[in-house]
Amino acid sequence: MPGEVRPQEITIERREGVMRVVWLTGHTSLYALGWLRAHCPCASCREERRSAGLAELSLSTELVDAELVGNYAIRFTWGDGHGAGIFPFAALRACCPCPTCNPDGLPPLWVE
């Protein structure tokens, strides 16, 4: 995995509601836990978004657990028990919320 999409350090800051990723390149990305939950890439969440739209979904943003999936992704378990979404590091890196990486705003995390 190229250094650009490989994390050096991942920290979950529950009180601040963010996940901090320091990439091997030295770049730091901060992802709001609410944004991650709303953009879960699993099939059931993708279908719910298509049917209801993001504004109509009521989702738990309380993070219960986070675990690495191999060396390519992270999976979260949320307060409502949902834990099916696997967030690939390459997709997270592409969606870095900083204005340098995405000056026109965040692209969707999932591929439709």
Image (cartoon, rainbow, N blue to C red):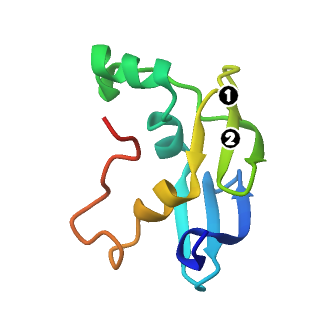
In the image, residue 51 sits, relative to residue 5, either above or below, namely above
Total number of numbered discs in the rendering = 2
Crowdedness of circle 2 by 10 Å Cα count: few (<14), some, many (20+)?
Answer: some
Crowdedness of circle 1 by 10 Å Cα count: few (<14), some, many (20+)?
Answer: some
Q: In what quadrant of the picture does the N terminus appear?
A: bottom right
- Whole-percent x, y for residue 96 in the image: 44, 65
Q: Which residue is mark 1?
A: 83
Viewer-proximal residue among 30 and 5: 5
- Whole-percent x, y for residue 14 in the image: 71, 50
Q: Secondary structure at mark 2?
A: strand
Residue drawn at x 46%, y 45% as measured from the top left:
35
Residue drawn at x 63%, y 27% as measured from the top left:
84
Residue 40 appears left or right of 60: left
Residue drawn at x 73%, y 63% as measured from the top left:
11
Residue 14 appears left or right of 58: right
Residue drawn at x 40%, y 71% as measured from the top left:
98
Q: Earlier in the sequence, mark 1 or mark 2?
A: 2
Residue 75's disc number: 2
Viewer-proximal residue among 56 and 84: 84
- Whole-percent x, y for residue 2 in the image: 57, 74
Q: In what quadrant of the picture does the C terminus appear?
A: top left
CB contact under 8 Å: marks 1 and 2: yes
Q: Secondary structure at mark 1?
A: loop
User: How far separated are the C-alphas under marks 1 and 2?
Assistant: 7 Å
Look at label 2 and name its amino acid: Arg
In the image, residue 59 sits, relative to residue 67, either above or below, namely above
Residue 32 appears left or right of 21: left
